[in-house]
Image (tube, rainbow, N blue to C red):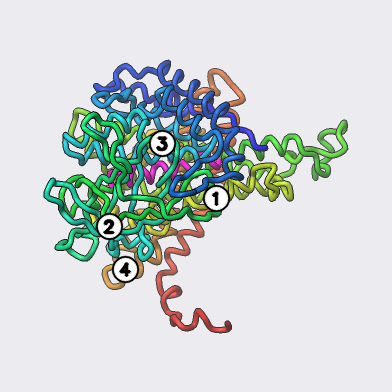
Amino acid sequence: MATYKAPLRDMQFVLNELLEVDQTLAALPDFAEVTPDVINQYLESSAQFAENELAPLNQTGDIEGCKLENGVVTTPKGFKEAYQQFCEQGYSSICCAPAYGGQGMPLTLGLPLMEMQISANVAWSMYPGLSHGAYSALLAHGSDELRQRYLPKLVSGIWTGTMCLTEPQCGTDLGLIKTRAIANDDGSYSITGTKIFISAGEHDMAENILHLVLARLPDSPKDIKGLSLFLVPKWIPDAAGNPATRNAISAGSLEHKMGIKGNATAVMNLDGAQGWLLGEVNKGMACMFTMMNAARLGIGMHGLGLGEIACQNAVAYAQERVQMRALSGTKHADLPADPLIVHPDIRRMLLTGKAYNEGARAFSYWLALQLDIEEHASDEAQRQDAADLVALLTPIAKAFMTDNGYTVTNLSQQVFGGHGYIRETGMEQFVRDARISMIYEGTNGIQALDLIGRKIMMDQGQKLRKFTKIVHKFCQAQADDAAMSEFITPLQQLLKDITDLTMAIGMQAMTNRDEVGAAAVDYLRLLGHLVYGYFWARMAKVALTKQASAPAPFYVAKLATARFYYSRLMTETATLKASIQSGAKNLMEIEEDAFALGY
C-alpha cells in the first residue's frame, strides 16, 4: 500500500527562504502576526493529520466508493469521522473571515495545507475544498442576511457546499443551461432542472449541504448573459438556524467513474427547490467566477498533490527494488542486483517528477501570496497588480500543473513496472485520480483559450507584460553572476520567444481567429515553462547562496534538480515554438468527413 510523508522541508524552503512570505504578510495589516513560527506550527500539525488520518483511508475509500440508497449517500468507512476531526481541529476555518468564526489566516498558509490533504486523500479533500469555494462566493456576493444565516455554519464545517453548473446538454458551454428559476412572492425563487457531475453533491459527512446553482429566469437572455446564481440549501434552516425543512433538491444517481471514487459525484435533481439570489439577476457568471477561480487553483493543486505522493512512492520503490546491474558497473556487490535507482532512465522519470512537483510548489505558493495581496493590501495599485497576475496565471496553474501532475503519476507508475499496474501498490489509483484534474473546472483546452484569448489578446498583453517584467528584472539582477548564467541565458531567450510569438499570433488572428485556437494549448505550455523556469532560476539562486556559506545535501539536490529542469524539461519549448509557428492550416484544411474515412 502507498504511504505519504508531508514534504515539510521543501514547503518551508519555498515559504521561508524562497518567497520570504513573512515579510510580505507583515506589510498586510490582517496578517502582521503570521510569523514563520506560526506557519511552521500549522504545517506540522496538518502534516500529522494528513499522514495519520487521511492517508490510511485513501485506498480503502477508492475500493469501497460511495453508495446511494433511497436518496441517501454513504461515504467510505472513516471519511465522516476524519471530517469531524478536521472540523474539531479548526482546519475548516483557517482561511475564513473572523467575523463568521474564521481564523483569518492567509491563503499562503492554506494552500500548503490543501496540498497535504490532496496528497493524502484527494477524494476526501474535495469535500472541504468545495465548501471553501462556496464560502468565497457567498462572502463576496451574498446579502448581509444570507451571510449571517449561512456563513458561520459553513466556516465551522457543520455545513458543506457545492457548485452546480453542468447539465446533460452542456459542459463548457454554460450558455446552454436549461435550469429555470421563477420568482416567489417572499423574495425567494423556485428552481427546477438537472445538474450532473456535482462533486460532493450528496453525502453523510455534514448535516446540511449548500448548493450554488446556476439557473435562468423566464425573461432572461437565452445565452450565458442570462444566468443567475442561487443559494439552494439541502435543508432550509429555521429562525434558530437549524435544518428544518427538506428542500426539493436530491441526488438522482451517482456517477460510475474512473477515479476519485471516494467523492460522491452526483446527478442532482431540482423540482421547484427554494433558492435565494446571490448578487444580481443575470450576473451569475460573474458571481460564479469568484468560486471557480479559487476552484481552478485548487484543481491545479491536485496535479501537485498527486504528483508528490506518486513520486514519493516511486523513489522509495526504486531505492529498494533490485533489478539488473548498473550499466557502468556493479554498485552494490552485496546484493543479487543493483537497486532500480542506479539506472539512468529510472532517474529520468524520478527527476521529472521531482522537478515538476517542486516547480509547481514554488509557483502555486507564490500565486497564493498574490491572492492575499489582492484581497488585503492597503495600496490600490498593489492590489490591482496582484489581481492582474492572478487572472493571467490561474489558467496556467490549473492546466500546466495538472498536465504535469498526470505525467508524474504515469511515470511513477512506470517505475514500478508490472507492480504499478496492480491495485495493491496504490500507483494505478494515483493515475486514475489524476486524470479528472485535466477535465473538470474547465478543461485544459478551455484554460488555454482563456489564457491567450481573454487574458492576453483582449487587453493587448498588459497583464502578460506585468509578469514578463518581473522575469526581466530578475534576469537583469543576475547579469553579473556567472554562476547563474546557465539559467539566465535560456530564460531570457524564452522570454524573447514568447514576446515574438504573442505578437505574431495576434497579427494572424486579425485575419483568421482559428490561429488563436490552433496555438492556444501549445502557447499555454510554453508560458508554463517560462513560469516554472523563472521559479527554478530563483530556487537555484537561493541554493547557490546557501551552499556558499553552509553546504547541505538539500541545496545540492535543489541545484541539481534546477539543472535537470533546464536541460531536460524546459527544452520542450523548442518543439512548442515550432508547433505554434506551423499555424492553423494543418489542423483546419482537412474536411470533416475525412476524419471517418477508413472505418
Q: Residue at x 71, y 45 (%)?
A: 416
Q: Residue at x 63, y 48 (%)?
A: 428
Q: Which mark is residue 128?
A: 3
On whether residue 301 falls in the magenta region, the answer is yes
**Going by the image, does 13 lie left or right of 395?**
right
Q: Are marks 1 and 2 in contact (CB under 8 Å)?
A: no
Q: Type of residue at label 2?
A: Thr
* SS assignment at label 1: loop
Query: How many neighbours does mark 1 have within 10 angstroms: few (below 14), some (14-19), or many (20 or more)?
Result: some
Magenta stretch: give its range.
289-307
Question: Do callouts 4 and 2 mark residues in contact (Cβ within 8 Å)?
Answer: no
| Secondary structure that dominates the magenta span | helix
Secondary structure found at label 4: helix
Residue bearing the label numbered 4: 508
The foreground one among 67 and 225 is 67
- Which residue was labeled with disc 2? 192
Q: Is residue 538 above or below residue 457?
A: above
Residue 113, image x and y in percent?
45, 30
Q: Is residue 98 left or right of residue 12?
A: left
Q: Position of residue 533 (x, y in %)?
A: 46, 43
- Image spot of residue 335 (x, y percent): 86, 34
Q: Which residue type carries mark 3?
A: Pro
Q: In 3D space, how far apart are the residues under numbered discs 3 and 2 (Cα atoms)?
A: 26 Å
Disc sitting over residue 259 in the figure: 1
Q: Is residue 343 visible?
A: yes
Tell me the amino acid under the disc marked 4. Answer: Gln
Earlier-in-chain disc, 3 versus 4 = 3
Q: Is residue 59 magenta?
A: no
The kind of residue tagged 1 is: Gly
Identify the secondary structure beneath mark 2.
strand
Of discs 1 and 2, which sits in the foreground? 2
Residue under the image location 49 percent in, 55 percent down: 255
